[in-house]
Image (spheres, rainbow, N blue to C red):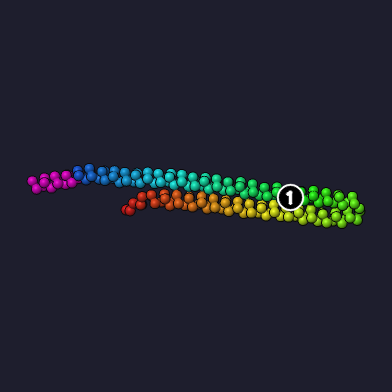
């Protein structure tokens, strides 16, 4: 009888183990599956945020580039118009002086040509300065856009890393 009692206890222990072990394994598999699903969702979310931030930053960079290019073009046109107006004005003065005599014409031509040249140089310098400022502003806008995109990508990666389940220990 004692032998049968021992055999019965062993049989019951084995039966309990046969039921409990697969249930524990299933629970562990569900946990890993849930963790993987959460990691995938976090990766999708972080990638979407990084994409949106990059798109937004690129749009801002493009807008800044368009704006500064327009300003540079406007400054160039304005400087050129000033130079042309000064040239027309001084040419008329030179023509008038030429009519009143060769000597006076020569002196007036030298004087007005110098003024026209100075006005042209000034207009060109203004245009060059405006173009330089516009290029600098464009470079800053692009740099800021790149930094913002990199920060957003880094933040998205950190958010994904935070949502990953810890590695199981053996």
Tell which residue pokes out farthest to the front in this image: 100
Q: Which corner quadrant of the image does residue 41 belong to?
A: top left
Residue at the image position 73 percent from the left and 55 percent from the top: 122
Side of 76 relative to 33 (left or right): right
Task: Work out whether residue 127 or residue 152 is closer to the camera in this orientation and state it.
Answer: 127
Direction from residue 92 to residue 45 in the image, left or right: left
Quick one: label 1, few (<14), some, or many (20+) residues within 10 Å? Answer: some
Name the residue located 71 percent from the left edge and 50 percent from the top edge: 79
Please report the bounds of the magenta region as a residue range.
1-14
Report the residue marked by disc 1. 82
Q: Is residue 13 magenta?
A: yes
Name the residue at the right extreme: 102
Image point 9% across, 48% down: which residue?
2
Residue 88 drawn at (x, y percent):
79, 48
Horizontal side of 32 relative to 55 (left or right) equals left
Instruction: Give the tally of numbered discs.
Output: 1
State the SS at label 1: helix
In the displayed orientation, state which residue is furthest to the left.
Answer: 1
Q: Main secondary structure of the magenta part?
A: helix
């Amino acid at each position: 009888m004692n032998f049968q009692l021992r055999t019965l206890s062993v049989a019951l222990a084995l039966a309990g183990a046969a039921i409990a072990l697969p249930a524990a394994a299933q629970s562990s598999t569900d946990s890993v599956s849930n963790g993987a699903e959460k990691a995938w969702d976090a990766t999708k979310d972080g990638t979407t945020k990084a994409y949106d931030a990059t798109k937004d930053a690129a749009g801002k960079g493009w807008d800044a580039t368009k704006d500064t290019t327009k300003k540079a073009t406007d400054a160039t046109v304005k400087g050129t118009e000033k130079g042309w107006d000064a040239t027309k004005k001084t040419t008329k003065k030179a023509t008038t002086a030429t009519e009143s005599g060769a000597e006076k014409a020569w002196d007036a031509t030298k004087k007005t040509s110098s003024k026209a040249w100075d006005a042209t140089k000034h207009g060109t310098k203004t245009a060059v300065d405006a173009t330089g400022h516009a290029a600098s502003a464009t470079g800053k806008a692009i740099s800021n856009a790149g930094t913002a995109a990199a920060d957003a990508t880094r933040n998205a990666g950190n958010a994904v890393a935070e949502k990953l389940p810890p590695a199981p220990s053996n």
